[in-house]
Image (tube, rainbow, N blue to C red):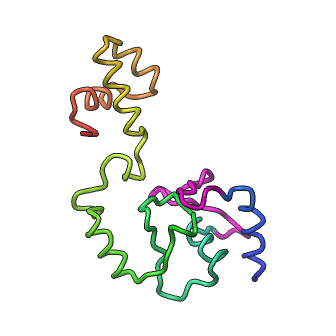
């Protein structure tokens, strides 16, 4: 095991969770939703670091694919190697291509769970004011309008 693998293992040791569920990276994240960690002034994606830690080196030209399609997940049980072509085919097959855009909780920039969106709508239908809802959920007036009018997050 290399020095970097030992350091990563030491840093991640306390975070191992249920082997069947996503292990969501709660540290820094890149704009695309992938977890990021730094060692010696170099950044690594958390899922790639996890793969290296549990399975060994990643061959040149190979991608680390998520079976769960959650970019923040670093559970090694959800990771496998594949080519860029396989990754793109997987994305198209699962309807995650940029053409349609990932919807709802599949979008890495998602701010609210489906349950929270439902609760916002119920609170709105029960008469809570826009001001109260915006304060309670930390949401803009425009986004609140789209959610309550079913223009966003059609469940």
Q: Compare residues 88 and 69 and report the one nearer the observer.
A: 69
Q: Compare residues 138 and 81 and report the one nearer the observer.
A: 81
Q: Residue 150 in the image: state x and y as whole percent.
A: 22, 32
Q: Look at the picture and state if 125 lies above or below 144.
A: above
Query: Which residues fall within the magenta stretch?
Result: 17-42
Q: Residue 132 in the image: state x and y as whole percent.
A: 41, 14
Q: Residue at 28% across / 31% down in the picture?
A: 147
Would residue 68 be found to the left or right of residue 28 on screen?
Answer: left
Q: Quadrant of the N terminus?
A: bottom right
Would residue 151 be found to the left or right of residue 78 on screen?
Answer: left
Q: Residue 69 in the image: state x and y as whole percent.
A: 41, 62
Predominant secondary structure in magenta?
Answer: loop
Taking the magenta stretch, the answer to whether it contains residue 31 is yes
Q: Residue at 51% across / 71% down in the picture?
A: 79
Q: Residue 21 in the image: state x and y as whole percent.
A: 53, 56
Taking the magenta stretch, the answer to whether it contains residue 16 is no
Q: Residue at 31% across / 18% down in the picture?
A: 124
Q: Look at the picture and state if 61 lies above or below 110.
A: below
Q: Residue at 46% across / 21% down in the picture?
A: 136
Would residue 40 be found to the left or right of residue 136 on screen?
Answer: right
- How many numbered circles does the render carry? 0
Q: Quadrant of the C terminus?
A: top left
Looking at the rendering, which quadrant does residue 23 occupy? bottom right
Q: Look at the picture and state if 80 lies above or below 14.
A: below
Looking at the rendering, which quadrant does residue 111 occupy? top left
């Amino acid at each position: 095991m290399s020095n970097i693998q030992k350091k990563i293992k030491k840093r991640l040791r306390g975070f191992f969770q249920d082997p069947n569920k996503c292990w969501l990276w709660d540290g820094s994240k890149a704009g695309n939703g992938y977890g990021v960690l730094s060692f010696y002034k170099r950044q690594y994606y958390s899922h790639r670091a996890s793969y290296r830690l549990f399975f060994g080196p990643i061959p040149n030209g190979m991608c680390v694919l998520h079976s769960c399609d959650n970019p923040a997940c670093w559970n090694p049980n959800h990771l496998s190697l594949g080519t860029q072509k396989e990754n793109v085919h997987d994305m198209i097959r699962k309807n995650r291509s940029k053409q349609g855009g990932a919807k709802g909780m599949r979008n890495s920039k998602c701010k609210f769970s489906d349950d929270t969106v439902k609760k916002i709508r119920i609170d709105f239908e029960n008469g809570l004011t826009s001001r109260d809802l915006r304060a309670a959920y930390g949401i803009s007036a425009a986004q609140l309008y789209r959610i309550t009018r079913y223009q966003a997050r059609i469940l």
